[in-house]
Amino acid sequence: MRYLNTDPERTYLRVDSFYSPDADLGTDAVTVCGLNETTADRLKDWEKHGYTTHFMTSLSWGNYTDYLNGKYDGKKHWDEVQATEDGTYVLHGLSSPFMVPTLEFTDYLAEKLTKVVDMGVKVIFLEEPVFFTKSGYSNAFKTEWEIYYGSPWQAPGSSEDAQFKASKLKAFLLRRCIVNISTRLKYYAKVKYNCQVKIYSVLNSFINYSQRNIITPARDLAARPQIDGFAVQVRPETTKIPKIYNGERKERVFETAYLEYGIMQELVKNTGKEMIFIHNPTEDKPTQNWQENKSNYEKILIASLLQPQISKFDICQSPEKIFKKKDQIIGAKPVPNSYKTTLLSVANTLKKMKKTEQTDEDKETAIGIFMSDTAMFQREYPDESGYSFAYAESIAEFSCFYGLCLPLMLRGLPIRPIILENLLSGHGYLDDYKIAVLSYEFMKPLSPAYHYVLSSWVRNGGILIYVGEDNDSFNKTNEWWQDCGCTFSSPSGHLFDVLGISSKIKSMRKKSSGLSRSPNSGIFEVGKGVVAVFDTNPAKCAQDKSFSKMLIKLVSSSAEKCGVEIEQKGYFMLNRGPYKIIATLSEEFNENLPINGNFIDILSENLEYETFIVAEPNSYHFLYDLDAADLKNTEIIACSAHTEELISDEKTFSFSAKSPSDMTCVCRVWLKNDADVFVNGEKKVYTKEKNTIFFTFHGGENKIEIIYK
């Protein structure tokens, strides 16, 4: 039996290789990547060594040469490759094109994947159903446009309306493709094998896709019964894309990862679907700065653990590149042994990580920042007008969104990115929130129904902060707000009408101070709640310190008006059972955070025992709280080897420990009695602190025996 594996699948590993002892990390399942002539043998090889196996392949790009060149059906399909205005193909890497998901391509891919079902796979991950905003000029896309809209194709770059329509169509085509494939594979498995298969979509967050000008139908897929769950990639390379705050452009890895994991946690809220958080301990670089890798890994890890509703983790991709010397990238520096040890200490700890319900206090003060699929729809602007608002250069940093988030987040306020489309889920989506922040400067509501839900929530005591000045050129798109007769011919105009404050907004906007650095704002009572309007583009709250301060003041004043307490602080902290997750900040607070107690530091190489921790600014902590654990019997607290075959009685406590051979393993155990420790029959020296013992042993297969004195 497997020790500590209380959930059949809580940790995952992605591989594209055959089984190797040095890639055997003891996860609950292995996802074999890539469909080729070796797939079946690779699946069997991992199964032979005791693993549940799944399969992953890309959806929008891959080795589709047989399809493109006519070998599949005698017809060439290069007109189905995503293309830009000048006819350039959109490629993944140097040679793999991104496809327009036509019905013919969908048939081709579904047929290929039935072979995976024939191999006995029950879970299939379809990676990155994506469409680039700069594309939309291929013949296949033009045909799909004419069918979908019943009118001649328009160049996406010709107007805001054409770009928005092209984006909606791209999302539809991707959703049609993955839902069609899922339906066919589920039907095939049921009819031929009388079994069920699950289909997961593997995505980057749609915050990330928005910044990188990529479209995916994230929320649309979450609403489809044919999709069983998601896995989200938060990659070190993309979290390092600079963000602007107070005019300073720099990497903000933790803040980015926190928001990206947060929005994907929200994606599956109230859907019953599963979400897996993917960790990448290394970047795909030919040479490695391992200190930087470790630093970014810890930031991304802690950001993921601060999302209390997710407890499934994909811990590593291609582990042989880390744990097997001969398979490491040519020219790369060797992976430090200390990093290997920490990675597996974390990986084996995550098997015990459970979901955590937020406390009433957290629910009371949570601040939601609205995000929508449609943020991906207006990243490309018409050629002749460009991005026509102040601080136009900030479009690359997605400052319209981050300008709402960073001023609040960097003051330690409990913000959560929340999904606009979830308002219509019927589950009281905003019940957990007292404050919500909204802007239509970078996204648009696809239904006026959202505003009636928002209005009801405000009238029952909610606080809505709206930031925007109705200058976004995508307000001109031919969507529902053009025909609803609203005051300002914009989505926000309809919202203000429903809230009953349009005349007040008109009056507020007339009272211009004449100072560009002093935009208008106002707080208006609506029922039991309030609506605060900050009449500026949210990008300015990222670009200019005075604007970020004005936003904070407006949020604080609105909260005070409704008797809602919000606390500014220099850290985030979450307790998940006996585990304490901490991230400290520095840009608005630059103070140490003292922490007293009895802790084991999971991120330290030797699983250090600490009674007093000084969390300095920009530090990240994953602690086991001995006092919160309330231990009574001998128990493994943390170990950098996979542990199995536990035997515990009055005289002994023993288990097997398995890990890659080229590493040092560490183990900390809570003991109920004094004992001797043996590894493969050899007595080990250990250190003892606060009823815990710590010892090390070489990687590989080991038998650990603890014999009570």
Image (spheres, rainbow, N blue to C red):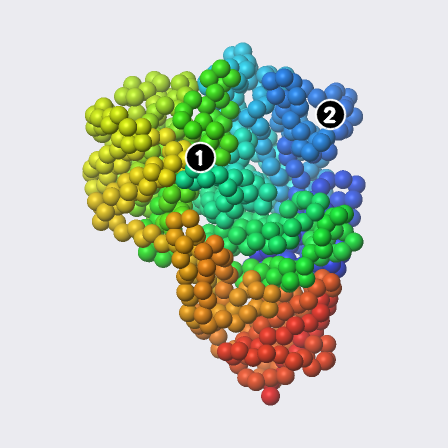
Q: Does residue 507 appear in this view?
A: yes
Q: Which residue is mark 1?
A: 399
Disc 2 + disc 1, Cβ < 8 Å: no
Q: Which residue is mark 2?
A: 68
Q: Amino acid at mark 1?
A: Ser
Q: Does residue 1 appear in this view?
A: no
User: What's the CA distance linking mark 2 and mark 1?
Assistant: 39 Å
Q: Residue at (40%, 57%) from the top-left corner?
A: 591
Q: Residue at (76%, 47%) from the top-left corner?
A: 330
For the C terminus, the quadrant is bottom right
Residue farthest along the top direction in this orientation: 152
Q: Position of residue 17 (x, y in %)?
A: 75, 49
Sequence-wise first label, 2 or 1: 2
Crowd around label 1: few <14 · some 14–19 · many ≥20 (10 Å):
many
Q: Is residue 386 left or right of residue 511?
A: right
Q: Quadrant of residue 650?
A: bottom right
